[in-house]
Image: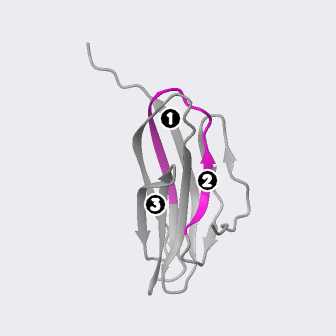
Amino acid sequence: MTQATTGEDIHFSDAQDAKSAGTSTNSTTTMTDKINRTVHPLAAGDYTIGFFCEIKTDTDDTSGVRAALLVDSAEKAECNWGKSQWHSFSGEAIFTFSEGDTPQIQMQFQRIGAAATASIRRAYVALVPISITAPD
């Protein structure tokens, strides 16, 4: 896998989140990690994974950028954008994990179409335990 170019390290905290605010670029059609982290062992239960990033390409003509959120190497959300203005890509999904699971969470991006440079910035993912109970 190709490494993205960035001017900063990715931070992963005990709160089970990861962020990489700086701009990374990719001029290939290979999906490249912006964030790639395996979380600490989890308690069994339901969790929400929320994510956000901004993407753009350096030309409006015949190229674009694709970003995707993956959990344990399976794509869970994706966005294509073909403009040179920054575009927000965000969402969240609920997952059920077993005791001790350590899911890998990735945010990846690539150039699509003609030769150009894809950019991603302000990437953030968060894994939060949730509790859903029936009303009394």
* Residue positioned 46% across, 60% down in the render: 88
Instruction: Name the amino acid, label 2.
Output: Asn
- State which tag comes first along the sequence, 2 or 3: 2
Q: Is residue 45 magenta?
A: yes
Relative vertical location of residue 92 with respect to residue 65 in this rendering, above or below: above
Residue highlighted by disc 1: 128
Circle 1: residue type: Val
Q: How is the image coloured?
A: one colour
Name the residue located 51 percent from the left edge and 71 percent from the top edge.
56
Residue that mark 3 sits on: 88
Can you name the residue that lies furthest to the left here?
A: 136
Region of the chain picked out in magenta, as a range = 31-53
**Residue 81's spot in the image, x, y percent?**
43, 71
N-terminal label among 1 and 2: 2
**Circle 2 — which element?**
strand
Q: Which residue is mark 2?
A: 36
